[in-house]
Image: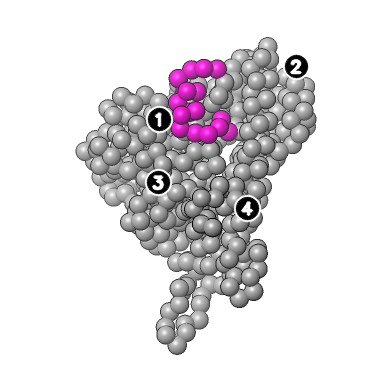
Amino acid sequence: MSTHTWHRKTLLAQIGIHTDPTYGSVSPPIYPTVTFQHGPEGLGPFDYSRTDNPTRAALANALTVLEGGAGSSLFSSGMAAIQAVAATLSQGDHVVLTEDVYGGTYRLFEDTFSKFGVATTYVNTRNLSQVRAAMRPTTRLVFIESPSNPLLQISDIKAIAEIAHEFGALLAVDNTFMTFIRQRPLHLGADLVVYSATKYLGGHNDVLAGAVIARDPEVAESIATIANACGGVLSPLDSWLLMRGLKTLALRFDQQEATARRIAQFLDKHPRVVRVYYPDLGSNADTWLHQRQAEGPGAMVSFQLPMDLDPAKFSARLQCVLPAVSLGGVESLLTHPYTETHRELPEALRLALGIRPGLMRLSVGIEHTEDILRDLETALAI
Ligand SMILES: *Cc1c(COP(=O)(O)O)cnc(C)c1O
């Protein structure tokens, strides 16, 4: 039976099997070695673990299949993965990015790559004419998130890929919020998918990791070359932890999303909540577009507290949901984007984007729905 017809759930459950021909261990072996002995014929398939390692390779192969790409590279964090994508650029190149891009991505381009002469333009990528107007003859990369963070705004991946290609640029999609379980940007025309694998892919708030998956073998090779040259690669032990986490990704995501749907509906009806941001709430153009390009709304819910409810007091009253940055793990976490994840963005830009002091971002975990709902209800009753 060909594995090509298998569902992603099956592929996930079986990640890393058949990687131990010696003993047939079901759990993939961890190779905590830096170097590999040369045989009588010279080099084997592995030489030095910065370049490649069997445990990391097992994970990379699985991700390539799951995402539908030509090759993957694994990094020690999501930012190291995004850095590798940025490092494909040269001095004088220009990048167009989603204006409410992850704060760390903004910082990477503005504080670091600007020093190497990489120019940037931030636009509202929901608006295709803004994307088109921002393109220059030197634009080599368009970098988007859909849904975006923290307002879960939807950008048309297929249409933006077409614009990027028309101008000879590549499209990279940060797919951290959706994962390949719900959205596969490479199938929609994107050239690169990047992940903070720290989030849903790992899923347990215990491993920091990043990934880049490329549609074209040559692009995949250039990312692998940069990974080897810059060196921020994923360790064998962390590669194994990530594979272990990935096995339950589909189950976790189904549960987290089902709970998130109920929480979004609850918050939407709550008189103390000013506004709720969730991809399948209401029937606007964003909802329709998201449903066309993704297979579910995901498990991130953002909401606006009223002016008279202090976000710090609200957070302090929660007992089940933990106030902490990060997302995608089995524990529900509540973030305050204005002072945490998006503090890197200039104040005026934050406010213009709708990242106001009362905005909260909830990453829904796998706790019982009733416990999370009751927790939010109690905290809102002040
Ligand atoms: C967390 C995050 C990153 C950065 O990943 P790290 O693993 O923390 O380095 C990038 N993009 C998005 C959307 C994220 O949520």
Of labels 2 and 1, earlier in sequence is: 1
Asked if residue 100 can be seen in this view, the reply is no
In the rendered image, residue 294 lying in the magenta stretch gets the answer yes
SS at circle 2: loop
- x, y (%) of residue 3? 52, 55
Q: For this view, does 79 lie left or right of residue 30?
A: left
- x, y (%) of residue 307? 62, 14
Residue for badge 2: 382
Task: State whether label 2 is within 8 Å of ligand 1.
Answer: no
Q: Amino acid at mark 2?
A: Ile
Residue for badge 4: 13
Residue for badge 3: 192
Say which of marks 2 and 1 sits in front.
1
Magenta highlight range: 282-298
Residue 141 marker:
none
SS at circle 4: helix
Residue 156 marker:
1
Of labels 4 and 3, earlier in sequence is: 4
Q: Quadrant of residue 322?
A: top right
| Residue found 64% across the figure and 23% down from its top | 264
| Residue found 61% across the figure and 43% down from its top | 250
- Residue 351, above or below 110: above
Badge 2: few (under 14), some or many (20 or more) residues near its Cα, within 10 Å?
Answer: few
Task: State whether label 1 is within 8 Å of ligand 1.
Answer: no
| Residue found 47% across the figure and 82% down from its top | 38
Q: Amino acid at mark 3?
A: Leu
The Cα atoms of the two marked residues, 1 and 3, are separated by: 15 Å
Badge 4: few (under 14), some or many (20 or more) residues near its Cα, within 10 Å?
Answer: some
The quarter of the image holding the C terminus is: top right
Say which of marks 4 and 2 sits in front.
4
